[in-house]
Image: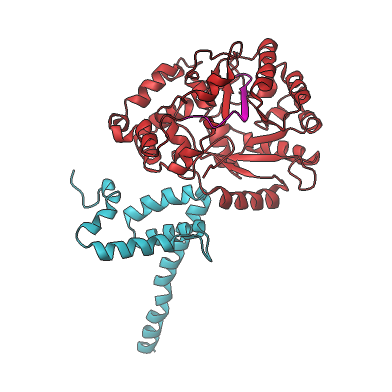
Chain colours: A cyan, B red
């Protein structure tokens, strides 16, 4: 069955350099730097990446950062809490706009 | 709840046969590709044939009997395994330790403490005056029977370095790999070891823990995970330990079975091969270690022992080995060796690069 997403394509991420080497090299170099231990640990960054992956609903990123989080020593509970952070922010982002709706409704009603 | 498992041997599983395991390892797509053979990788790193740097560690497997049946066990150990080192072979080991001049003796199993001559053997090794004696204690054995309750005191008397597996600081991960209830008992055993001074900074009694992944993924950074383990074990259980060793699971025996059954085998092998690290390869433990089987045969490491790959020398039994032959041997390698060279590398003492 043909699909837009193919798990095998994840391994080919580096191939984007084939069409534009200079920018790809800069991106991958930057990417590598971002995920190193710094003010945040590599483990903390992996959990953030996992949460963001769920926010942007990128199947490649969810695949990659589920593995990466395990290999950074995270457990199932920590990983699911990260996904709940995504859900809370996404849900909250919708709900907080409820205030905008209320403002408009109050403006228009007696 | 994890399901109770039995040894491959007792289930008459084909993987109980080391020849079959080697066949599985050799038939992977990756090993057909010469670039992916472990030998070719070593050749590219100028390490082929792999030669020893000395004999510093004398590792002895005193038997395959164990009170646990861990899902990933490379020994295929369990209560049904009756292969136990005899006192006669232990005497050959004592001679062997003297003959090689190894500074460290590393006792493993199964649960080494289940060998009826274990304490006698430790006492005799102590008399040899080696620098370090390690016992790979699975922790739960301390609580398994009244006769083992004083093991912490026994270890202390002989200044044994205790190395114990604890795959995670929670019960879910630990029990999934090592059996239901193992985490709780392990914590109790660690507290008993702490009580006699193990893992405490001022006693010199060393208690090291071993992490290995509960699944088909590579281990995390040893130093980062050690911080996490120390914090969690201290705050949740008031447990202290010295160092954490992070170990990669090798694709043999029951872990190989898990990989095949869970359809993770090909991806795991590809991951190990991709993560090949030449500096880890230069420091693999087989270069300064020899491994002795329960029946006195000599191997390059405990993994080769379980695959029945004896050292490549004319005399490969404790009864007649020749030091010079061992020092000049070429170490026997196969595709499973990728487990020791992936990422930061792996050995019985943790990462190696």
B350 and B317: which is toward the camera: B317
Report if residue B34 is visible in the image.
yes
Q: Nearer the viewer, residue B315 or B107?
A: B315
Residue drawn at the location 64% of the way across and 19% of the way down: B62
Residue span colored magenta: B51-63
B52 drawn magenta: yes
Query: Is residue A101 rendered to the left or right of residue A39?
Result: left
**Residue B109 coordinates in the image, percent (x, y):** 61, 24
Q: Is residue B165 above or below residue B291?
A: below
- Location of residue A40 with respect to A109 vertically, above or below: above
In depth, the one of B134 and B227 nearer the eye is B134
The quarter of the displayed image where residue B191 is located: top right
Residue drawn where x is 64% and y is 40% of the image: B209
- Counting from the top left corner in percent of width and height, residue B141 is at 69, 27
Q: Is residue B264 visible?
A: no
Q: Is residue B230 above or below residue B59?
A: below
Give x and y (percent) for residue B276: 41, 41
Q: Residue at x 37, y 64 (%)?
A: A30
Reply yes or no: does residue B99 show up in magenta. Answer: no
């Amino acid at each position: 069955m043909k699909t837009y997403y193919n798990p095998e394509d994840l391994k080919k991420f580096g191939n984007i350099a084939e069409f534009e080497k200079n920018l790809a090299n800069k991106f991958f170099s930057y990417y590598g730097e971002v995920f190193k231990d710094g003010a945040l640990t590599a483990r903390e960054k992996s959990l953030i990446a996992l949460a963001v992956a769920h926010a942007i609903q990128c199947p490649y990123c969810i695949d990659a950062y589920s593995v990466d989080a395990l290999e950074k020593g995270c457990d199932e509970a920590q990983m699911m809490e990260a996904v709940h952070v995504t859900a809370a922010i996404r849900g909250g982002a919708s709900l907080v706009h409820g205030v905008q709706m209320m403002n408009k409704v109050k403006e228009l009603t007696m | 709840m994890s399901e109770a498992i039995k040894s491959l041997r007792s289930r008459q599983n084909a993987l109980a046969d080391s020849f079959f395991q080697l066949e599985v390892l050799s038939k992977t797509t990756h090993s057909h590709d010469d670039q992916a053979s472990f030998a070719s990788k070593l050749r590219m790193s100028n390490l082929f044939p792999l030669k020893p740097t000395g004999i510093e560690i004398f590792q002895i497997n005193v038997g395959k009997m164990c009170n646990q049946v861990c899902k990933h066990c490379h020994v295929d150990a369990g209560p049904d395994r009756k292969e136990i080192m005899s006192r006669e072979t232990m005497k050959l080991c004592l001679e062997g330790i003297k003959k090689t001049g190894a500074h460290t003796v590393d006792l493993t199993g199964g649960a080494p403490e289940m060998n009826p001559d274990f304490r006698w053997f430790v006492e005799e090794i102590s008399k040899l005056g080696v620098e370090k004696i390690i016992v790979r204690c699975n922790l739960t054995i301390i609580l398994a029977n009244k006769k083992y309750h004083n093991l912490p005191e026994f270890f202390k008397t002989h200044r044994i370095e205790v190395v114990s597996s604890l795959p995670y600081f929670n019960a879910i991960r630990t029990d999934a790999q090592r059996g239901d209830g193992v985490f709780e008992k392990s914590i109790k055993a660690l507290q008993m070891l702490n009580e006699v001074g193990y893992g405490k900074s001022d006693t010199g009694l060393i208690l090291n823990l071993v992490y290995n992944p509960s699944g088909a993924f590579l281990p995390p950074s040893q130093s980062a995970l050690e911080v996490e383990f120390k914090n969690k074990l201290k705050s949740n259980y008031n447990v202290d330990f010295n160092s954490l060793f992070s170990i990669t699971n090798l694709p043999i025996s029951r872990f190989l079975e898990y990989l095949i059954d869970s359809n993770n085998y090909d991806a795991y092998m590809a991951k190990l091969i991709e993560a090949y690290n030449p500096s880890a390869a230069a420091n693999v433990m087989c270069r300064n270690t020899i491994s002795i089987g329960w029946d006195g045969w000599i191997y390059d490491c405990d993994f080769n022992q379980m695959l029945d790959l004896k050292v490549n020398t004319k005399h490969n039994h404790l009864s007649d080995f020749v030091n010079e032959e061992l020092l000049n041997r070429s170490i026997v390698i196969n595709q499973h060796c990728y487990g020791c060279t992936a990422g930061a590398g792996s050995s019985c003492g943790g990462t190696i690069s």
